[in-house]
Image (cartoon, helix red, strand yellow):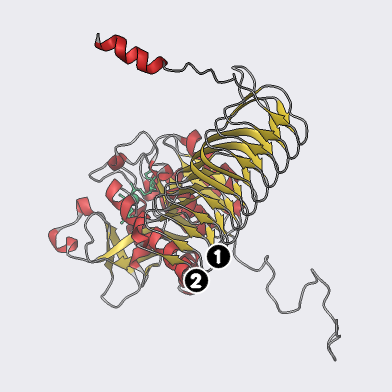
Amino acid sequence: MKKSKGRPAIAEGQKIAGAKTRFDRPRVAVAIMAAGKGTRLKSQIPKVLHEVAGKPLLEHVIRAAVRIAAPTDVYAIIGYEAERVRQAMQPTGINFVLQADQRGTGHALMVARDALSGYDHVIVLSGDAPLITPETISSLLDFHLDQHASMTLLSADLANPTGYGRVLRKGASSAEVQAIVEEKSASLAQKKIHEINSGFYCFLGKDLYGNIDGLSTDNPHSEYYLTDMAGVLRRARKRVVAWKTSNPGEVLGGNTRAELADIDHFLRMAKARQLMTDGVTIYYPATCVIDADVSVAPDSVVEPYVQLLGTTRIGAGCRVRSYSVIRDCEIGDNVIIRPGCVMSESRIGARAEIGPYTHLRPGSDIGEGAHLGNFVETKKIKLGKGSKANHLTYLGDAEIGAGVNVGAGTITCNYDGAHKHKTVIEDEVFVGSDTTLVAPVHVGKGAYIAAASCITDDVPRDALALGRARQVLKEGWAAQKRAEKKS
Ligand code: UD1
Ligand code: CA
């Protein structure tokens, strides 16, 4: 590396004079309210575990949160089916606080007092509003810090504000907020306000916990409303402000099944648009279901009614035809997937051709240029380069070499009722149609298996194996039978 003149090089990790260290920054926690049951969903599954774009609502919110703070400074407040929620979100590495009885959003923050009161600022997010972006949270925090506010809420103008809390500003052009009034308690005039409370906030930690005991349950739901902190802090002569987002779509919550469908559609379309921007052709994108973590390389074509799920990765120049459902698969370049294929946890090499109606079950590793056709099912197999199994076949627990032809109707009998056994077929073997291979069995390189054979013993290299009864012929038998029937 060239040394720059005049200045000494800075060693890694060395403090640079004038730059802020992490100790200069205020300590910020993110609390995610996720304890509610979600009564309006009429479900056994807790609301925050309902999925949009293939992931639970709460996971979307956590993903945004950990872009703002370290996972160790993120706290999900959980209650309804808490253990189930905690287990599902454990891999994110965040903390959990239990709100055993769910007595409102204000109560959620009360029970988190021990966890949160050591922080300078507390950002509060809703576990049921998954469209929030790290950029918006960050802007909210910046505004809160600039304003030296005790409470800053994120607001939005909605064409239809029904159901949301309304923001009562001190004056039309004032940043300051007088109070938030919930739909159920709002007067007719207040219901006409279109500026709504999004359910995202920043609090000055010491003011939040210095005043939270001022909340009461004097409202139609008899709950502690976090929204009432606006009024409580105002009365304590603290500064309460609102920052209005220009992306009202980000505040939408999934309180009902219809709202979940709207959010899912929004996220799916955003994903499809991103892939199209990146060079993928998608016909009728609104009919496709593509999860957030899926990747597709340029010049691949996705036909209508395709589902690409989980961590599926598709190479360049592929074509995925209609009605295929692909989960957690890795697909090379220039692969053709014909209509109606179902595949999961499998790998497909470049230039392979699959389908129509092929079922790849977990652990299928399909070699370059291989062909799998109609009604072929595979599980835990390795299929070599250029090998073919084109019709009506089951291949399970098998290792199949390159250049192998597997005839129509071939079956690996891999299960003896108690244990699974392996079939090995070496390179360039020809397996005649309607062969059953009773595992464990080994077929040597270049061997030839006659059609309709039941192969129970190993076949050596270059041999012919016949495993069926010799044909019997009875001349005139059928004609005689017909004559007997007539008389
Ligand atoms: C809340 C706001 C409302 C705002 C709206 C935006 C209150 C009182 N109202 O209403 O002003 O317009 O969000 O979406 O806050 N939760 C807990 N513990 C509880 C109760 C709720 O953790 O005891 C969680 C829920 O799981 C949910 C979040 O808090 O993730 C919001 O609760 P929810 O009941 O959905 O509030 P909204 O009626 O939507
Ligand atoms: Ca809500």
Q: Quadrant of the C terminus?
A: top left
The dot on residue 297 is 1
Q: Residues at badges 1 and 2 in contact (C-beta under 8 Å)?
A: yes
- Figure quadrant of the N terminus: bottom right
How packed mark 1 is, by other alpha carbons closer than 10 Å (few <14, some 14-19, many 20 or more), is some
Residue 401 in view in this figure? yes
Q: Position of residue 145 (x, y in %)?
A: 50, 70
Quick one: 94 or 357, which is closer to the camera? 357
Q: What amino acid does circle 2 point to?
A: Gly
The residue sitting at 36% across, 33% down in the picture is 44
Asked if ligand 1 lies within 8 A of label 2, the reply is no
Residue 5 placement: quadrant: bottom right
Q: Is 100 left or right of 471, judged from the image as shown?
A: left
Q: Nearer the viewer, residue 34 or 267?
A: 267
Which residue is disc 2 drawn over?
Answer: 279
Q: Which numbered disc flags the more N-terminal residue, 1 or 2?
A: 2
Secondary element type, mark 1? loop
